[in-house]
Image (cartoon, coloured by chain):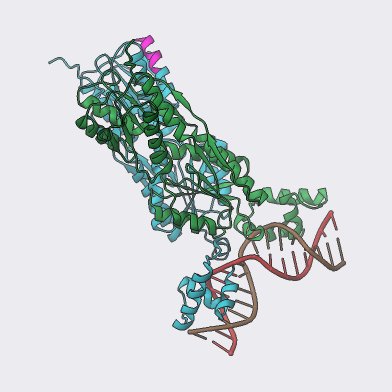
Chain colours: A green, B cyan, C red, D brown
Amino acid sequence: MRIKDIAQLAGVSVATVSRVINNSGYVKNEKREAVMKVIKEVNYTPNEIAKSLKIQKTNIIGVIVPKISTETASKVVDGITVISKENNYHLLIANTNLQMEEELNYMKIFTSNLVDGIIIMATIISDEHLKIAKSIDKPIVFIGQKVEGFTSIVHDDYNAAKAMVNYLIKQGHEKIGFIGVTEKDIAVGKLRKQAFLDALKENNLKVDENIVEIGDFSLESGYKAMGKILKNGKPSAVMSVTDQMAFGAINCIKDNNMSVPEDISITGIGDSKMSRYFIPSLSTVHYNHEEVGRIACNNLINLINTKNNNVQNITLSFDIKIRNTVKSIRES
Amino acid sequence: MRIKDIAQLAGVSVATVSRVINNSGYVKNEKREAVMKVIKEVNYTPNEIAKSLKIQKTNIIGVIVPKISTETASKVVDGITVISKENNYHLLIANTNLQMEEELNYMKIFTSNLVDGIIIMATIISDEHLKIAKSIDKPIVFIGQKVEGFTSIVHDDYNAAKAMVNYLIKQGHEKIGFIGVTEKDIAVGKLRKQAFLDALKENNLKVDENIVEIGDFSLESGYKAMGKILKNGKPSAVMSVTDQMAFGAINCIKDNNMSVPEDISITGIGDSKMSRYFIPSLSTVHYNHEEVGRIACNNLINLINTKNNNVQNITLSFDIKIRNTVKSIRES
DNA sequence: TTGTATGCGTTATCAC
DNA sequence: GTGATAACGCATACAA
């Protein structure tokens, strides 16, 4: 059913039909009603593709995520959903499964007039990313990593991690282990580790390289990292840069017949849904991922509408959630 | 940059350019190379919207999910992603936030030639759903609920739940509590409860209405439901129809100074990522959500390509995962 | 107020 | 092998 058919059935021209659909221009009430009646009768919906071609706008936002089946990513998408819905945008989601090739690929594909703008949640931003991003004439906003020349929304990873370490130190911990991820990931890998290092240094504590390990975000990797740490020198506390890896670490500690926090204290970052319900409940830092998504989407839509290039770098704050995986060992 | 510009730059006609892009028809090697050179030089990508309008196919699959930030939904989407990528489809994802209105709305929107087919993961299928689904002339596949006249992919909820209850009974439990969800949700609410009821009956056990409660999928609701159960009569085991609610229930038990499984046994359904790492690890039934997504997507693409209406109802099996939340209380 | 005609960027038919 | 050109379904400039 095309606009032409509706016009015929209603006894008017296509222009008139288009006018009533889009509520634009003048059309006599009588005709408007006739048209609306036909539209309802035949259950007509305009062809969005044709419309997009004509007005050069799809009302679709491209979202590139590393892995949707991740609490962080899916919550961000939840936030994006809210704002996009409010503004009548649809979401074309590219789930790259952590494949950088795929990310680059989708950035290109989305350029093909398929979307009006792009939100990309990249874990690692390469030069190639930047090159393509610069060559794209559509607005882009980055989530999770600050990117030169583009608007980005990030959490204050450095200070969040630092606050967590400082808390540990205040509880009397001096030999603190660390479970991180690759430093290619600026936010989670580099910034949080730097904060760990700096906090120790500022408190005149030395870092023991034997008890800093690298995981890959998974529960399993947290378990393994903790295993190595236990072998290399028993710390009184371990900071994991991720809740998931912290849960893995706690399991490892338990399997070695020790318990948290009595024998070893553990902290995470992220405040995942389970962290409050894990037993013991996890001390961690709370991030608001939905808000990141909302802000990112709002900024993108602004960029789309205003066509200016007003770059903004937004850093969101955090809350420390003190729960039950840290024990004070301060001498009183 | 349009196809016309490429044609001009390469000194050929638009038809020829189109031919080399789509690898269709004959074109002299010489010209083909000239065209490809220009395309590479100016970094041209065809306008997908225009193409879609012309060929009446968008290569986009519409996916309607109740809440993407849910382990089940996001894993299903992961599975859909794999197959859609293999077949060169993109995913337009509608996150309805459990609003039925939104689901219906998106079913209509997607009809507007935006997508080639729809995968819908509905929790509750109303008559309205059916009515709209029938009026849509694009292929639809349902996930999670069997729907008359449409192809659907479901897990064997009835037998999975029954196997779990039978296991509990075999361990000697006779007073078994139940935490369910609304029975409007056929799969999770109705089928799993029916299995619970039937299993008890078949073993000549009576169901105590005082210890069957309803939650809303959330951890919190599992906690609350368990609270009521504890008040109304202490069972030796409780079956939750969801891992999340089981975790909540375990927390409640702990807060009441009892422990799992020593005082009360608990089981879940779903085998969420955390269930193996929860302490104690949760006895539950394993579902393969990625596979559901893969199968759904494969079926949909088949439907799109063949244009036939070959309805299939696929039921996937399950595995019981015996872990550490159930204690045997059989007298020996 | 309304209708006619053009073009958005493709693909595909048809003639050469 | 190749090039004009007519659709695809819509919005809109312009004419009436």
- In the displayed structure image, the side of residue B61 where residue A310 appears, left or right: right
Magenta residues: mostly which secondary structure? helix
Q: Position of residue B219 (x, y in %)?
A: 41, 24
- Residue A124 lies in magenta, yes or no? no
* Residue B321 lies in quadrant: top left
Q: Position of residue A261 (x, y in %)?
A: 30, 20
Q: Residue at x 58, y 57 (%)?
A: A137
Q: Position of residue A223 (x, y in %)?
A: 26, 33
Most extreme residue toward the left is B332
Most extreme residue toward the front is A204
- Bounds of the magenta segment: B225-233
Residue B154 seen in the figure: yes
Say above or below: B57 vs A310.
below
User: A223 or B210, which is in the foreground?
Assistant: A223
* Residue B275 lies in quadrant: top left
- In the displayed structure image, the side of residue A252 where residue B7 appears, left or right: right
* Residue A245 lies in quadrant: top left
User: B122 or A159, which is in the foreground?
Assistant: A159
- In the displayed structure image, the side of residue A133 where residue A44 appears, left or right: right
Could you tell me which quadrant the N terminus of chain A lies in?
A: bottom right
Q: Position of residue A220 (x, y in %)?
A: 28, 36
Say above or below: A256 vs A102.
above
Residue B158 seen in the figure: no
Could you tell me which quadrant the C terminus of chain A lies in?
A: top left
Q: Residue at x 41, y 33 (%)?
A: A195
Q: Residue at x 38, y 9 (%)?
A: B231
- In the displayed structure image, the side of residue A280 where residue B30 appears, left or right: right
User: B233 or A319, which is in the foreground?
Assistant: A319
